[in-house]
Amino acid sequence: MRVLIAEDEVYLAEAVQTVLSREGMAVDVVHDGAEALERLSYTDYDVVVLDRDLPEVHGDDVCRAIATDGSGTAVLMLTAAGRLDEKVRGFEIGADDYLAKPFEFRELVARLRSLARRPREARPPILEAGDLKLDVFRREVYRDGRYIKLSRKEFAVLEVLLGAEGGVVSAEALLEKAWDENADPFTNSVRVTISTLRRRLGEPGLIATVSGSGYRIAVAGSR
């Protein structure tokens, strides 16, 4: 899952980034609304954790822009105001969820997972291919009933591949969805992660390389 944190409280933003990264999410951080809009113009985020009182461009205006750009990016709005009318206002301008400060990190993570299960194509919480099952919410992977322990990055890559439903996913797309903004586009991280993921998933192999294009999940009977 790729997440943008737009929060002007630097220490809070860094704390949230640390927690979400530990949960296997690829996380970028900005501290004002103008930079948030700039990032959104060239990066495809699954969820934006959006502080309402941002400098430069107010969080409400960022939220309106996201709601009307057709990207399908979900917005979880953060604010110090927990009054009902403030929450209603947030939903009216396009927020998908609302969390008042102060908040528990566990609740934030749970809400983000919930938003990620309401994607653009209504992706189910259990992704499957042949005898492989990935539980998005529990962060668990099973093959033929056997639990497979994956690293956070391996899980993120597998989630993107399964979500493509047999379609080819380029290395660039995997970098964008499973790594953060600091990823080197010329790195071999994708190739290395795919290699270790293949070993962990075992035989018969499930991840096919499509020469010059990327990778796809291929099961028996698929083309």
Image (cartoon, rainbow, N blue to C red):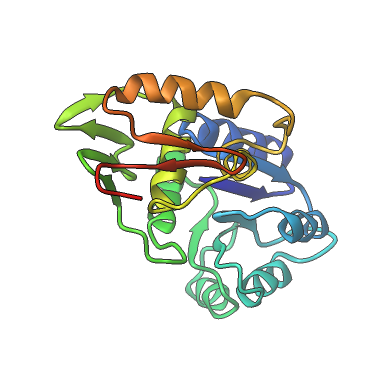
Residue 104 can be seen, yes or no: no
Q: Quadrant of residue 144?
A: top left
Pinpoint residue 37: horizontal percent, then vertical percent: 76, 61
Residue placed furthest toward the left: 145
Above or below, 12 against 146 in this view is below
Q: Residue at x 62, y 38 (%)?
A: 175
Residues 209 and 189: in front is 209
Pinpoint residue 165: horizontal percent, then vertical percent: 38, 53
Left or right for 137, reference 105: left
Residues 16 and 43: in front is 43
Residue placed furthest toward the bottom: 92
Residues 135 and 29: in front is 135
Residue placed furthest toward the right: 56
Counting the numbered discs, the total is 0
Residue 157 can be seen, yes or no: yes
Pinpoint residue 29: horizontal percent, then vertical percent: 70, 43
Q: Residue at x 65, y 37 (%)?
A: 180
Left or right for 37, reference 116: right
Q: Residue at x 35, y 42 (%)?
A: 218
Residues 81 and 191: in front is 191
Left or right for 113, reference 12: left
Above or below, 7 against 63 in this view is above
Q: Quadrant of residue 138?
A: top left
Pinpoint residue 35: horizontal percent, then vertical percent: 81, 54
Above or below, 219 against 6 in this view is above
Q: Residue at x 57, y 75 (%)?
A: 94
Q: Quadrant of residue 53?
A: bottom right
Left or right for 13, reference 198: right
